Image (cartoon, helix red, strand yellow):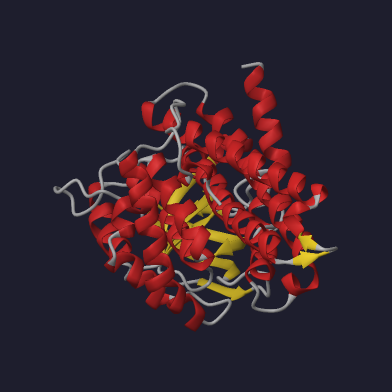
Amino acid sequence: MDLSDQKGPPMVTPFALDPQQRAWREELRTLAAERLRPLAAAGEPGRVNRPLVATLGELGLLARLFPADGTSGGPAAGAVRAMDLCLLRESLARECTEAETALALQGLGAYPVVQSGSARQRARWMPEVVAGRAVAAFALSEPAAGSDAAALELCAEPDPSGAGDGWRLTGEKAWISNAPDADVYTVFARTGQAPGSRGVTAFLVPGDSAGLSGRRLDMLSPHPIGTLTFDGVPVGAGDVLGVPGGGFRVAMRTLDLFRPSVGAFAVGMARAALAAAVAHAGERRAFGGPLKDLQAVSHQLAEMATRTEAAALLVYAAAAAYDAGEPGIAARSAMAKLFATETAQYVVDAAVQLHGARALRRGHLLEHLYREVRAPRIYEGASEVQRTIIAKELYR
C-alpha cells in the first residue's frame, strides 16, 4: 500500500513525487512483475542469475544508474541521481526483491568506477556492466573488519619484481555479495603504514586475476555471498581507483549514495507487506466479521502505514538532498537507512502476525519478505553504525 497512490488532494510536501516519477514507478512495478519475477523464480539460489542481470540491462534499468557521457565509453563521474536509484530500488523491491538486489549490486560494485575511475577503466568495464554482460561486486568487508571498515587488513605490498608501480594483494575478504562469481571487483586494501582509514587504496580487480579465488557461504540469501582469497594478486597503478591512500573516501562516497537506497529497498518491502496485510484483514473473517473491524487490527494497520510513509519521506528527502549537493549528506543517508530498515522489519513482522501460520508457509510472499528483510539492517553499515554516524554529525 502506498499513500501517494490514493485518490484525493495531491501531496504538496517538499518531498512528494511528481506525476512523472509516480508513473515511472508504476512502469517499473509492471516490468518487475511481468519480465523480472519469472527470471528470478527460474534462478538458482546462491548463484548469480545472469539472465536476470542481462534483462536489467536490456530493459535499460542499469543505464538509469549509469547515464553515459558519450565520450569515454562509460558514465561521467557524479552522473547517477540518488532519487532515480531510490525509485528503482523501491519499485523493484515491491514486486521482485531478487531483481532489486541484482540491480543494486551492479550499482554498488561499479559506482566507484564511475566516481573515481580513469577514462580507460570506465571504457573497459562500464559498457559491459550497463549491458548486464559483466557482474560487479564491492569488496570491502573482511573477517575482522565488518562494521569497523577502517580496520582493513588485506595487504597491498610493493611488487617484488621491482617494477616500481605495482603491488601484490594478500589476504581475505568476507561477506561479499556476488562473490565468488563476479567478473570485476572493487577491492579495498591497505597500501601504507598509516593507521585507520588513511592507508587504504581502492583497486579494480578482474574476477579471473591470477591468485584470486573464493568460496560460497551458505547464507540466508537468494544471491551469492562469499569469501575472496588474495594470494599475491598483481595490481598496478592503472588498477587504482582514485589515488593511492584515498580508498576510504571512495568507499564512503559510494556508501553515502547507496545508504538511502537501501532504505528505499526496505520501503518497497514494507509497502508489499502492508498491502498484503490490508488485503488479508479486509477479507479474512473472525469473531463475526472481517479482521479489519477489530480495533487491535485496524490500529496495527494504521501504525504500519504511518511508519512506512515516514520512512519513504525520509528516504526521498535524503535522495533529494544528495542530488542537490546539500550539506549533511552523511547524517541524512544514515537516518534514511536506519529508520527505513528498522521500519521494514517491524512492518513485515506485523504483517506475518496478522496473517498467522499461513504467512510462514514456504513460497508465501511474507515468508519470502521475512527472510529478505533482516539483512539490510546489517549490510552497508549496521543500525548501530548508522546511529554512531548520526551522533557524530550532530557535533561536527
Q: In the depicted view, which residue is nearer to us: 174 or 370?
A: 370
The residue depicted at 58 percent of the width and 76 percent of the height is 46
Q: Position of residue 217 (x, y in %)?
A: 66, 73
Q: Residue furthest left?
A: 71
Does residue 229 appear anywhere in the picture?
Answer: yes
Q: Quadrant of residue 115?
A: top left
Give the residue drawn at x 31%, y 52%: 64
Identify the residue at horizontal 82%, vertical 63% (top origin).
288
Left or right of 154 on screen, residue 387: right
Q: Is residue 215 above or below residue 306?
A: below
Q: Is residue 258 above or below residue 30?
A: above
Residue 325: percent from left, percent from top: 39, 26
Q: Residue at x 39, y 51 (%)?
A: 25
Whether residue 145 appears in this view of the structure is no
The part of the image, by quadrant, that contains residue 15 is: top left
* The C terminus: image quadrant: top right
Asked whether 198 or 321 is in front, the reply is: 321
In percent of width and height, residue 22 lies at 38, 46
Q: Is residue 168 above or below residue 225?
A: above
- Is 363 placed left or right of 295 in the picture? left
Estimate the x, y position of residue 124 in percent, counting from the top left.
25, 60
The answer to whether 163 appears left or right of 123 in the picture is: right
Nearest to the observer: residue 84 or residue 259: 84
